[in-house]
Each structure stands twice: as structure tokens, then as C-alpha cells.
Image (cartoon, rainbow, N blue to C red):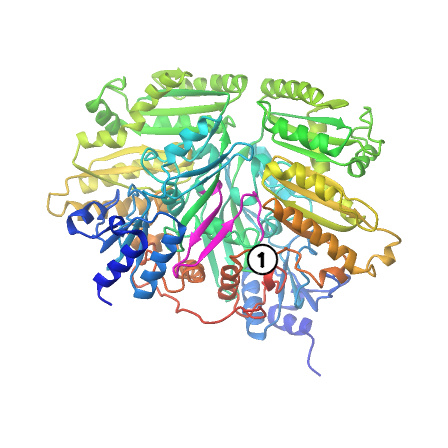
Amino acid sequence: MESSLGDRLARLLGGSVVLPVDDLEIDEMIPQAIVRPTERVQISELLLWASSEHVSVLPKGGGTRLNLGNVPRKADVVLDLGAFDRLIDYQPADMTATVEAGMTLATLQDRLAPGGEFAPLESAQPRRSTIGGILSVGAGGPLSYTYGLPREWLIGLSILGTNGISTKSGGKVVKNVTGYDLNKLYTGSMGTLGVILEASFKLLPIDPQNGMLFASFPSLSNSVTASRKLIHSGSAPAGCLSATSGITRRLQDSTLAASQDLGLGEPETALLFAFYSGRSQATRRRLEEAAAMLIAEGATAVQRIEGPAAKSTLRWITDVPTQVNEDSALVIKISVPSNSTPPTSAECGDVALFGEKPEQIADPGFGSIRLFWPKYGDIQSFHSMEPQPIIDTIQNVRETAQSYGGSAVVEQCPITVKSQIDVWGDYPDSLAIMQNIKYRFDPNSILNPGRFLGGI
Amino acid sequence: MEFSGFLNDLKAIVGDQNVVHHPDDLLVFEYDGSVDRRIPEAVVFPGNTREVSAIVALAYYAGIPVVGRGTGTGLSGGSVTPPGGIQIAFPRMNNILEVDTDNRLALVEPGVINLHLDTRARKDGLRYAPDPSSQKACSLGGNIAENSGGPHCLAYGTTTNHVLGMEVVLEDGSVVNLGSLARETVGYDLRGVFTGSEGTFGIATKIAVRLLPLPETVRTFLGIFPDVESACTAVSAVIEHGIVPAALEMIDALTIQAVQNVSDAGYPDDAGAVLLIELEGLQDEVEEIGREVEAALWDTGATHVRTAEEAEERQQLWAGRNGALGALGSLAPNYFLVDGVVPRTQLAQVLGQVADISRQYDIPIANVFHAGDGNLHPCLLFDERKEGALQRVMEAGTAVLQVCVDAGGTLTGEHGVGLEKKEQMPLVYSEEDMANMILVRDAFAPDNTLNPGKIFPDGTKQTPRSQHVFPGMPA
């Protein structure tokens, strides 16, 4: 009898590297083996061997977004990078840091804080999310309006290719045009081009003062309109989000806003969250000006929070999509030019699935919207849901996003739907170049095969 | 095919008046702002994307290399024509197609001058942040090719942080769009990797860039220091206060001398270094941080500190810095500008080593640089008419780059590799690192007919064109 993949990996890399698969599954596929190497050479050996054996390798960080992307064509070996979690270099006066891919975001920030600095990366579940995972997904968070995406802060990478060779791009300096900027290529590539070992970032100083505003509006569209005005005002926040009542009702449960009457119990009430940081005096002035402006824009209540409570709320809204996902049948993230956020939000907000309209979190400054359609019936029925209405909803939302020059990525849906669609949406005309890059970096298509758009 | 036939075909695409091929007329297209030169076989001025596409396709099938040229202000030989090649230049494609104030973005043609876009944006309370020193002359197309920087990149990032998307013509004349008007797009970040590809991936024919709101207040500080070491200490002190200024620039004693030769910038005779710091933001924030900056300057040994808030006064403080490179002409007929970058904390030490190289090679070196992001600009002063001078300067330049790399830095912060630094690439990158880069170029331009011979050392292994189609995909 042929020996199992786990046995072969144990012989290749050493028995202690191979972990039990337990209950790990990716899009209902159970991998044949999980490996957690402790030395870089083991990853190198794994990739070389996998390339020659046509065994697929799925790199994994904290596992918080394992189901993002298309259903993999093959899920043979999960490569857990958690053992690579060192801070390699941190010079506060240089405002740069180099870390291994398996370090969690929370650990990184904790290590940088004594130097008075932070990495402007945002992620849900920062105690689990790793730097490598955050870079692979390439997404931002509630402060994307100011900080943009991880691509803006990444200055260097160390990568293991499918040929087992370690290469670097960029370096440790904040300004660098030496050779092609492959950092941009790897960021957001969903682990399809190489395995990230190490990353260097530009950092920012921690602002001494934090503050935020909650404002209640009679409807989401009022809130989104007010967001746009606020973003374009002299007292613009670092980030501004609008969310529907189904989202913000969870806030009431979390006690953060329990002491104030923001009308969170009302079915239509939408909340606006505006986050500020900076020097004390200037931050307070902006909070005052913004509060007055939101009242003038029709807010029914405005609550101001400063200090640690403001940070907790930022944490809460960064994490809340993860919680809402659990109760959702379908989650779509839309990106549009920022001024198209109000009409896109309004049109997509009317798209019902099984009679239910979606909950929304919109970022009208950055131009993104997350839509959550709730599950119906019991949990068992979730995966047996009839796919066609969901596919129709996705198509409907995509057409709306495209009509505004944007795109729509399906972040969560039943497997019956996922196996029939490309979650990344319609293909850009540059797809052939992307496929060509993939083919050249990973000719045997072993890294996360099929997970990215267009079969990449 | 005879070259004359090729010229006729070019003329058929763009009209006789838009093809330059007389040797006298070609002379001005021989060089950029660096030391390398080569006269192109012809220069073509297309008027739109369709014409660019037709020209590129024609050249591709004729086996003639093509280089896109902005306005020739580049500092690494990036737009110097490859052997037997033609240039495509964009004086006719210089329209700002749209300034969208609501989305805070602009759509431009590649020939638009950087400062023209910024000036236009300012009418609506916006700005285009990347501001290369050549911004009065350089074009957005060239900025994309080189991923240009500038003094204000310290706070706002370089060109790549401001490009949303572009329409590009590939080497066979096909046209594709990269990125989009939305901040986030799906798939590999091709507009990101295209930016800074030095014209080897394709030619951008339309460019969408972000515009930022103008700050409420701008305040400029000028500190005069007895020497570069103390000015570097001031840089560290400012950063340690948790301050990221919009700009943080330095000039050294030799540069000060050159500036004063040309016109009195008001620098005292014994000034050893001038530090310029610009703060932007809300009035009260700038005031609060400004007090800290001023204190830091005095604490670290400044002999004079001046500040200005009004535009005209700020211009005066900047005048010495902005005129510095031009003023070097009062010291020597030529300069060779090295663009090395080092970690900020290594600045003082590296400048000391640069001074050693200056003595060792007996070449005066003037320093004008972006101190905030560790981007040095040592200017090696020489007279190219003297036999062997250029050769010696290039050797000293390589020594300076070696010092930068040894300090944990790199070859170029904002000027690009081009022809000038391609042989130094192995100081920073392994063969495998470069092979990976070439894989990406192969995906965009498998036949390497766009600006060939740049960036990578001569003799770098070139991967052959692959006919493979991506597995599992409809053709």
C-alpha cells in the first residue's frame, strides 16, 4: 500500500513537523496533512518536493480567513507558518521594523509600542491574524481612508519560491526604486506566488490622543451622506464608517454605547462612527467641529468618546465583520470610487435574498461596502440552501458595482454556490498577464491552486 | 524592411510633422539628466492611445526597440534610447482629462507636467503630492516609469502610493487597463508593479492619480547648524518626538557655498549645514508640533532658526534648497548625482564615509538630500572635458553606493536604475532576486522590446519566451 502523504512528509521533514489534521477544513475540503516547520530549509524542501510531486500547498497564518477565495482545486498540505514569529529588527529612530510572517499583528504592535510606534496595518482578530496572512489578503480596515492598504507600508519582503529558493524584494529603507517593486505583486496575491518569510514595514508614531464620535441617523443613506460631508470637511476623521442597525445592535450588547441613548434599538437607526487621533488640542477641536456638523446633517444623537474607550470601539468595529459573518448566508465586499458609495449602498441595500435585505458597513471615504445577508432557517439548512437565488443576488450586486466602476468580491457563501462561481468577480482585461505571472512563478500550480481569480 | 519604409509607416500613423528623424533634430533626444547618451533612430509624437498602439505594434513586428520618453529629466539614463531604437515622446498627449474633486482624483495623459497637474488641482483645494525637484518640467508618464519621489514623499509616499490605475500599451501594441478608479481592485496589483518598471513593461497612455486635500496650515522651519553631524542629530531628535514632518531636507557646507555664490540665500558664512523642516496640518496641531521642532533644533546645536507660514516667506526659506543643484554649476561644470538610500540612523556615519571617498578620489562632493527618509544625493563635482574625469567619478559613485548598501541601504531611492546603476544591481540583489523580477517582465513583455538593456546587468540570464498557456484556463 502506498504510504500516506503525512508519512511521506514526516520522512521528508521530520515527524515533529507533521501535525494531526483534526477538524481543519477549507471550503469543506479536508487537507491530507498539516505541517508546521520550524526551520526555513524545511519550507524550502517542502516546496521543492511539492513542485516535483504536484502536491498542493496552502500556506496558513492564523487561519482567520481560510475560506476567502475560490474552492481550491486541491488541498493536499496546509503549511502552518506560526513557528516563524520573531521580531527580526526594530529601530525606533529609523521608524522601520522587520518581522517574520507568522507573528501576529497584536504581538507586533505590542513590540513596537515601547518605541512609541505602530505598523499601520488593520485586521480583525489581531491576536490570531499574522503578518503573512494580512499581506497575502492585502486588505485594510476602518482607517483605510487614511492608511490605505498594507501595500502602502510594506518596504521589503523575503520570499520562498516554488523552486525552493529564497529571494528578496525591496529592503529596509523607506524609499526604494532599485529594481521592480515586487512587494506590490506579492501583497494581496493570496499566497499564490510564493511563501512570505519576512516583511519590513514603514511605521508611524502613536498619536497621543484618541477620540471618536457615534452619531445616530434615521437611515443608512442619511448616515452615508453625512460621512461624505464629514470626510470632505476641515475636521476630517482618520476613518468614518456607516453601519445599519443589525450591525450596531451588537454594539449595544457589548456595553460600549450602553450608557447613551443612541436609539440602537430602533429598526432603521444607522450609526456613523468617526475616528480621530492626533495631538490633544487639535483632536478635541476636530471632535467638537465634527459633532456640530453631524447634528447639522440630521444626526438624532451624537456621542463623543475619548481615550481607551475610543480605541476599544475601533477594535470592535474592526472585528465585527467576523461575528456578523457567522450569522450570514452571503457576504459581499464592494469596492467603488468613493463618491459612488452612497448610490451603490442604496441600490445594493434594496437587493433582498430570501426576503431579507442586507446589513451593511460602508466606508464612504475609502469607497468600500460590506453587505451581509442573514442566514435563514436552521444551521443545518445553510449548506443545503438552493444556490440559484444566491447566485442571482451576487450577479445583481456585481452589476451594480460595475455600473459605478467598481468590483464585488464574495467573501462568504454556501459551498454549493461557491463551487459554481468565481468569488473574485468578472475578469479584468489584464487577467492574461496575471495568469502569465502565476505560471512563471509557480509552473506546477502548487500554491493555493485555483483560489485566486481566473483559476490562478 | 528598409528603415525608410519604417519611417514612412510611422508618418502614416501620426503625420509627417510628428516624426523626427533628421540627425540635427535628434540631438536633443540623445540624453536625459544623467551621463549616458545615444541618438535615437527616430522620435515619434503620438496624439492618442490608438496611435501609440499602432507605433508600438509596427516597431514590434519590425524588430525595433522602443523607449517611451517623458521630458528627459530622468537621472539614470532611463529614457536613453536602446541601440537601433526609436523614442515615443508625449508633448501632444499633455491633457488633464479630468479633475474629479468629489472622488479626489485626476485622469491625465502621460505628457502632463507634474506641476501643471498640481497647479490645476490647487484651484479646487487639492494637490498632487509627489513633487520631484524637476516638477516644473517632468511628466506624469515619466513619474510612473521611475516611481518618482520628492521632498514631500516623507509624509505622503512616492508616486506608487498615488497611482490608482492606468491604461497601458504592451510591447505588441495591445492595450490593457491596470488598477481602477476604486482604491481596491481584484487580482494581482499590476498597477503597483508597473509603477517604477522604467518603461520595460509597457507605455502608460492614461493615468489616474489620487489628489489630496490641501492642509489648513503649512509652516516651514530653517535651522542652521555648524556641521552635518549636529544637523543629523536634529533629524533624529525630531523623529524621536513622534513627528513625521511633510518634508525634512538638508544641504551641506559645500552646497551652501554654491548657493551663496549664485545669490544670497541669507546663509551665514560659517554655516556647516542647513536643515529645512516643513509641517502641515491643522493650525493648532502645527503650532504645538512647531514648538517642539523649534526646541529640538536649538537643543541639537542650531545657531539660527527661522520660521515662516506665509507662502512667499516659505518660498524664500526653500529657495536655497530648490536652487541647490543648479547652483552647483558655480563650482564645477558637471555633477554626477548619486541617489543612495540608508536607514535614517546611519545618515551621519554614511556622510562621513562619503567625505572620505571625496578625499580619497580627490573629487569634491556636495550633499543635498532628503534627510527624513535617508535618501542621500551626494553630487560628485567634475569637469567632463578632463580626460578620465568621468571614469573616476563613476568609480567614486560606485564606492558611495557600496557604502550605502553596507549601511543597510540601497542604490536608488527615487531616480531609478536605468543604464547608470544596472551594473551595481548585484550589490543589492542576488541572481535569483533579479531572475524573479525578469519573470514579471516576461509576463508583460516576453520579447523584451520595450526599453531593453536597462535595470539588469549586461549578461543577466534572460528567460526565453514561453508559449505555455496557463493550465486549466480557456485560451
Q: Secondary structure at mark 1?
A: loop
Kind of residue at badge 1: Tyr
**The N terminus of chain B: image quadrant:** bottom left
In the image: residue A171, left or right of residue A346 = left
Q: Residue at x 36, y 19 (%)?
A: B302
Q: Is residue B410 visible?
A: yes
In the image: residue B38, left or right of residue A400 = left
**The C terminus of chain B: image quadrant:** bottom right
Q: Position of residue A191 (x, y in %)?
A: 58, 57
Q: Chain of mark 1?
A: A
Q: Position of residue B466 (x, y in %)?
A: 44, 70
Disc 1 packing (10 Å; few <14; some 14–19; many ≥20): some
Give the mark count: 1
Is B259 a magenta residue?
A: no
Q: Residue at x 76, y 46 (%)?
A: A351
- Classify A415 as above or below B322: below
- Classify B289 as above or below B46: above
| Picture quadrant of residue B361 | top left
In the foreground, B236 or B146: B146
Q: Position of residue B328 (x, y in %)?
A: 22, 31
In the image: residue A454, left or right of residue B361 = right
In the image: residue A16, left or right of residue B260 = right
Is B163 a magenta residue?
A: yes
In the foreground, A1 or B65: B65
Q: Residue at x 10, y 46 (%)?
A: B387
Magenta residues, start to end: B160-186
| Picture quadrant of residue A357 | top right
Q: Is residue A177 visible?
A: no
In the foreground, A118 or A332: A332
Q: Position of residue A437 (x, y in %)?
A: 49, 61
Residue where numbered disc 1 is placed: A427
